[in-house]
Amino acid sequence: MPINRPRFVHGKILHNAGGGIFYRMEVALPDRIEFAPGQFAMVSGWPGNDPLLPRPLAIFRARGARGKGTVEFVYKVAGRGTALLSGLHEGDPIAATLPLGRGFEFGGEERTYWLLGGGVGFSTVFPAAVFLEQERSEFEMFLGARTRDQLPPRDWIPGGGLPGRVHPCTDDGTAGFFGTVTDAVRDRLDRLKTPERRRLMILACGPREMLRSVSSLALPLGIPVQASLENHMACGFGVCWGCVTEVREEGKTSYRRVCKEGPVFDAREVVW
Amino acid sequence: MTQAAVPDIRARVGEVLLKNPVMSASGTFGYGLEFTPFYDISLLGAIIVKGLSLEPTAGNAPPRIVETSAGMLNAIGLQNIGVERFVAEVAPRLADAGAAYAANIYGRTIEEYESVARRLSGVPSLIAIELNASCPNVKEGGIAFGSTPEGLYGLTRRVRAATGKPLWVKLSPNVGDIGAVARAAEEAGADAVTLINTIVGMAVDHRKRKPVLSNVTGGLSGPAIKPVALRMVWEACRSVKIPVIGIGGIQSAEDALEFLLVGAAAVQVGTANFRNPNACVEIVEGIRNFFIREKIARVDDYRGRLVL
């Protein structure tokens, strides 16, 4: 049975190595994972009770056959948990609950997708690119970083980063577009004709400020935005109610769980 | 030597006989159904569902949680779907799943507590009501009633009169004399006491010069609180005759056994569910295996047998 609904599994690290400021970890699992782009896992592996909680990581890639699978995660060292993960080696045990959350939604005829990844957010949108490539759907990618060294390694980019399809953006202008992802999107939108704009759908993951600014740019033009939010989580599967974000629906606001109703939200609903 | 038989790990909490001594703690297990992808929830001693109020409650603004050393602080603010929706939509599905479940309840006023208890009294499959007199994160979460023996006595007495269901009272550790508070619950007619709820704590961001949680303070849970919980459960067991349900930082079967040893009739597992969704069933198995290894026939042959 492929793992296609939440399960807690034990695995062993096959690789765990750096690529620029990021790490990429591949874990052998007892079965193949089926996941939707945008879904995530709660990952731990260090011994002992401190830190206590697993860390939410996007599912970057999954492969394998019946009874044997592998899953890959990409992460950046941001705190104690990811620092410990980065110190694990081949053969070390990993525990993971996966696949979790609601991923991106595709569909709609003749869509052109713009995939936006700010910082480590590319790890959430690359699986969407892989999917769209299989579907032969049109897409472009905008990848944002402070500076050149903080962009994802080129050989991690699905399809190798064909020119014209992948737009790196750096805050300091050291590579690609000089400015933020939102600036690049604005620039590109200005050069599109209305029928082309009508076909657009934006899938985005990155800092909250990037998601907010892209939404305030695209939504008034009628371009739908699916935003993958990040938050601290205790459980990752909807029982602690710790990761909520405020959403607006039918004029009323309420708190929804990033791990369960998200992490991908219709940007129109999010109270930024 | 005789072969060790399969041990009887059933646990008795007053008139309620549980399949085993392991319950999931309120607020860490949703409404129970969330765990059905992971395992058969009827394997648990009982599920204590998330605290229910008369009306649906929105909860606190984020940030609501922060990790601390070997633990975490939470200030969820009792976000829940309200007792009506629970009775209509969730309770039948828990019953269908064959789960033993109890409802944790809270109110802003004593009258609300009574109303929630009355509403649940008519749910046949519900095994008990757990009175939350100890949520530290909302003023109305019962802490106002639960922090003194007098306040707790008054609240428990009123809810006792409102329901014929077994009544378990969940106690706050944020009190001076846990024995006195437990005795107040007993005298007011509680069938059992559950302790401990979370310990009030605080986390501060020294750069931003702000508290991390929007609620400023939150409840500390996880392994960090286990020694405090164990001591309080031990004290409560010596203070009352009614069963004591032990909770606080339990991560493993060994932790659970320690609570049984100081006298707890059963235990609840909370924060461990976040790290490992299978924690509760793994603890059930661990207890069973320990009893087999040690040739312990039944829970009462081990429970309360702390050698002093």
Image (cartoon, helix red, strand yellow):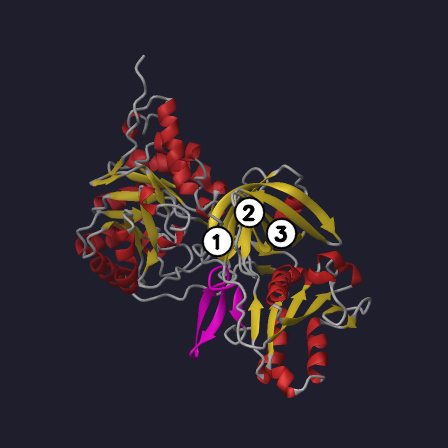
Q: Is residue A245 magenta?
A: yes
Q: Is any part of residue A107 visible from this angle?
A: yes
User: Is disc 3 in the same subunit as disc 1?
Assistant: yes
Which of marks 2 and 1 precedes in the sequence? Answer: 1
Given residues A132 and A58, the one toward you in this image is A132
Task: Check the image and name the residue furthest to the bottom.
Answer: A194
Q: Secondary structure at mark 2?
A: strand
Front: mark 2 or 3: 2
**Relative to residue A36, is residue B233 depicted above or below?**
above
* Cα distance in 3D space between marks 1 and 2: 13 Å
Which of marks 1 and 3 precedes in the sequence? Answer: 1
- Which segment did they paint magenta? A244-266
Q: Is any part of residue B248 visible from this angle?
A: no
Residue A156: x and y, percent? 71, 57
For disc 2, the marked residue is A65
Are the two marked residues, 1 and 2, in contact with CB atoms closer than 8 angstroms? Answer: no
Lateral position of residue A121 relative to residue A259, left or right: right
For disc 1, the marked residue is A4
Residue B235: x and y, percent? 35, 35
- For the stretch drawn in magenta, the main secondary structure is strand
Number of callouts in the render? 3
Tag 1: amino acid:
Asn
Q: Is residue B116 magenta?
A: no
* Cα distance in 3D space between marks 3 and 1: 17 Å
**Relative to residue A167, is residue B286 depicted above or below?**
above
**Residue ID at (60%, 80%):** A199
Are the two marked residues, 2 and 3, in contact with CB atoms closer than 8 angstroms? Answer: no
Front: mark 1 or 2: 2
